[in-house]
Image (spheres, grey):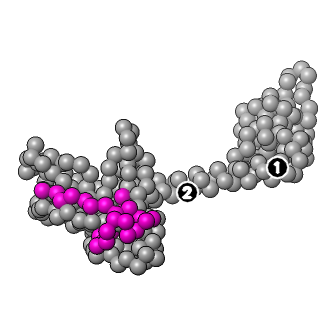
Amino acid sequence: MLTIGDFARLGRVSVRMLRHYDSVGLLRPAAVDPHSGYRYYTAEQLRRLNRVIALKDLGLTLAQVRAVLDDVLDVAELRGMLRLRRAQLEAQLAADTARLAGVEARLRAIETEGRMTTQDVVLKELPPVRVAELTAVAASYESADIGPVIQPLYPELFRRLEAAGVTPTGPGLAYYEPAGDGEKVVVHAGVGVAVVPDRLPDVAVVDLPGVPAAATVIHHGSMDEVEGTMQVLARWIEENGWRADGYARELYVEYCAEDPSGGVTELQLPVRRG
């Protein structure tokens, strides 16, 4: 027989944890001294302890672990439980991967601060343009929310244009507008065309009005790393007595779907005198 301390050391758990397992009926000691209350375990019980730890590491609750070890669950129920846990872990991994990518993008934005100056900003008038577009709704204007929404729109838009025999007349153009009173944003993925509106029944054709004054700047690289360039625009607007007048348009001068880091985008932010 092993004392609780020896059993804990062999099983690489704490004495406190063994006492908890005893209290919930998950791993009872083989014997308890009636006078001292000391708990004693057998070496054979290490098998159950190891299974408890393994199932806990899968993310099962103690109640689920006990049901598995006591054969309360049949094979189908156990399989379903483990598949659910696998899906949860996969979703968590995807979320953590996206969060890591966001952190890395922010770090790169911080590292590039100061490389661009407000001298790179150009104030100009934007002419009206007719675009064929598809739209979707993003949870917010953050890059992490915009990217997954807008990226699938362009391949589908170009597929529909090709099917209709329409050739774009210019680069891709994205713009945004609020979706109600919350943070949600309507994402417009468009491209310049020279067709009448009813020429494309499954694609919206919209005439974007001209913009009298827009602060513009060229962004090099992925749009996931656009924050630093937006900071340059913000400084220029503040320093020159202008105010932002809506969301920035994005003119994709060079669109690199396979390698976003090679992209060249002109940010066009409508402004007005403050």
Q: Quadrant of the C terminus?
A: top left
Q: CA distance from mark 1 to mark 2?
A: 24 Å
Q: From the viewer's perspective, is residue 196 above or below residue 229?
A: below
The magenta segment is 188-212
Q: Residue furthest top?
A: 35
Q: Residue at x 46, y 76 (%)?
A: 163
Q: Is residue 264 left or right of residue 160?
A: left
Q: Foreground residue, 178 or 19?
A: 178
Provide the residue designation for mark 2. Answer: 94
Number of the label disc, if any, that sits on residue 78:
1
Quadrant in the picture for residue 175 = bottom left
Spot occupied by residue 200 in the image (x, y as percentages of width and height): 40, 68
**For residue 146, side relative to residue 270 (left or right):** right
| Location of residue 103 in the rendering, given as x and y in whole percent from the top left corner | 40, 55
Residue 182 position, x and y percent, is 38, 39
Q: Crowding at label 1, few (<14), some or many (≥20) Cα neighbours within 10 Å?
A: some
> Relative to 150, does residue 54 appear above or below in the rendering?
above
The residue nearer to you, when weighing 261 against 271, is 271
User: Which residue is pictured at 32% across the width and 49% down the height?
Assistant: 177
Looking at the rendered structure, the secondary structure element under dot 1 is helix
Q: Amino acid at mark 2?
A: Ala
Viewer-nearest residue: 175 or 29: 175
Query: Left or right: 171 with respect to 187?
Result: left
Q: Secondary structure at mark 2?
A: helix
